[in-house]
Amino acid sequence: MKFCCSGIQQKCQYEQEQYPSQKGRLGTPPVGLPMTQFLLPLSSCLVVCLVGCASVPNAKQLSTGPGHDPPVIQGSNHALSPAQGEHAMASVARFPGDDEKLQRQVAAEGQVAGTPLIAGNKVTLVQNGRPTYDLMEQAILSAKTNISVESYTIEGDSIGTAITDLLIEKHKQGVAVEVIYDSFGSQDTPTAFWDRLRAAGIAVLEYNPLNPEKAKVGYDPNDRDHRKCMIIDGKLVIMGGVNISEIYLYGGIEPGSIDRFWIPWRDTDIAVEGPVVAKYQQFFLDLWASQKGDPLPQVQFLPPLQPEGASYIRAVPGTPQEGDPQIYVALLSAIRHAEKNVWLTTAYFDPTQEALQVLADAARRGVDVELSVEGQTDSALTLDAGRSHYHELLDAGVKISERRDVFLHGKTATIDGVWSIVGSSNLDTRSVIWNNELSTIVLGRDFAQQMEATFAKDRAAGVAIDRQAWENRPLIDRASQWGARAFEVIL
């Protein structure tokens, strides 16, 4: 790793040396918050600067190209035959004669992701915090053998307490429970919260502790587990962008407060049942082992799984610190293959130069490229940095709308009415080069229609960015955005 502490003044090139993106709470400290809560993220940025730069991967080079091998499609117990695979692709083809091209795309994607496309799954779309927490609570209550929880943020608030109360109760009933939380993302959660879980007999793992004395596998302040998933009995997974925090439940700005954290959060999760769930469970077990967690309970983590539905699903783990930015490469590959439309929803929109180019190229070749991004945020610099790229996209014909009535935290895309992705990965540099992420690719028309309907609602509730009006925006806004771009390397 090359150290570049002068990076605040000298910007690294995107495709050679890019600082990690730091999602700190930068800007004016909200009313009512202690100054220490405002200064902590600033000190975190200094740590990032001292750690140095990391390379942004070239997704096109990492993509293996279309090739001629058929896609690997796994059934519940064995791989589908070539004939079965061809039939599967024909059933989800975007238009007549498209199945062969779709086969090549899916085959290339599989080589990039390193995981097979798995048939026979059921996927349910879940929107926002309350429905997601209700589903989590129902799933916990139904557990018979084991519950695995992994989340970037688990707060010690009403939601965190309610869910962990259920976990403790299920553990008393003989259900094994293990929890992974990210040390940085959950830094505001009291130690007593975790002590209570451990005292109840629940296995708890702090991912990459902020205190280097507690680290078991080396120390890296940029290494974070940004995943959010819950696995029940090895048969059901709930995953996406929703953290365990009551912030999702607030219905409006607190009287007298200008804290953006009090606006409603808009997010997306999914529930998945079927053979693919074994992949999510294995990702959890692999992460636990890599962090040298305590011995896990002796339960059947990977039970036999039967088909539950008709969805073809690929579970994709993003592990960029191991040299595997699978989610980033798979997404850009799908956009490069797009024929009709690319509708993308993302929080913390501050894309790499290659991502900008891929989106612009798609729009120029006639693909309907639309972005639904945040207009309210907990990182003013990130918002401005992302906005500084709007002109490049607008000039290419990309349509952009901002949700300003909520904090848009979802991380989804749907392409050509058949390819969709839901997960934890933002379209920013940190997600590409540092964070452990988790995404789900769903191949199928029915789910894509649900995703398109969700996007349409976000678009309708958003504010469309008019190209001419954007060019005429006030000079002070331009200065703020270009100033933020100068700091992109440490956001």
Image (tube, rainbow, N blue to C red):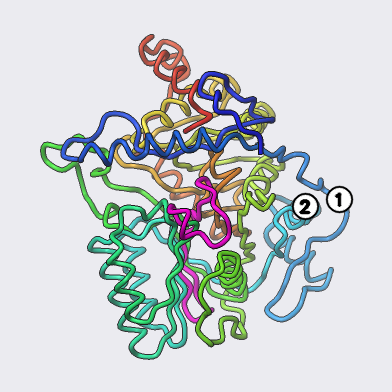
Q: Residue at x 50, y 20 (%)?
A: 486
Q: Position of residue 25 (x, y in %)?
A: 34, 37
CA distance for labels 1 and 2: 7 Å
The residue at the far right in this view is 68
Q: In this rendering, would 218 be left or right of 201?
A: right
> Residue at the location (36% across, 84% down)?
171
Q: Quadrant of residue 164?
A: bottom left
- Can you see residue 228? yes
> Residue 89 appears at what percent x and percent y?
74, 61
Q: Secondary structure at mark 2?
A: helix
Looking at the picture, which amino acid does disc 1 mark?
Gly
Residue 35 in percent (x, y) is at 23, 36
The residue indicated by pointer 1 is: 67
**Pick the front one: 201 or 427:** 201
Q: What amino acid type is highlighted by mark number 2?
A: Ala
Extent of the magenta region: 209-238
Residue 74 falls inside the magenta stretch: no
399 left or right of 409 in image: right
Q: Please name whichever residue, 29 or 120, is drawn nearer the observer in this view of the structure.
A: 29
The answer to whether any part of residue 310 appears in the image is no
Q: Are marks 1 and 2 in contact (CB under 8 Å)?
A: yes
Determine if the magenta segment contains residue 216.
yes
Residue that mark 2 sits on:
108
Q: Is residue 339 depicted above or below 87 in this figure? A: above
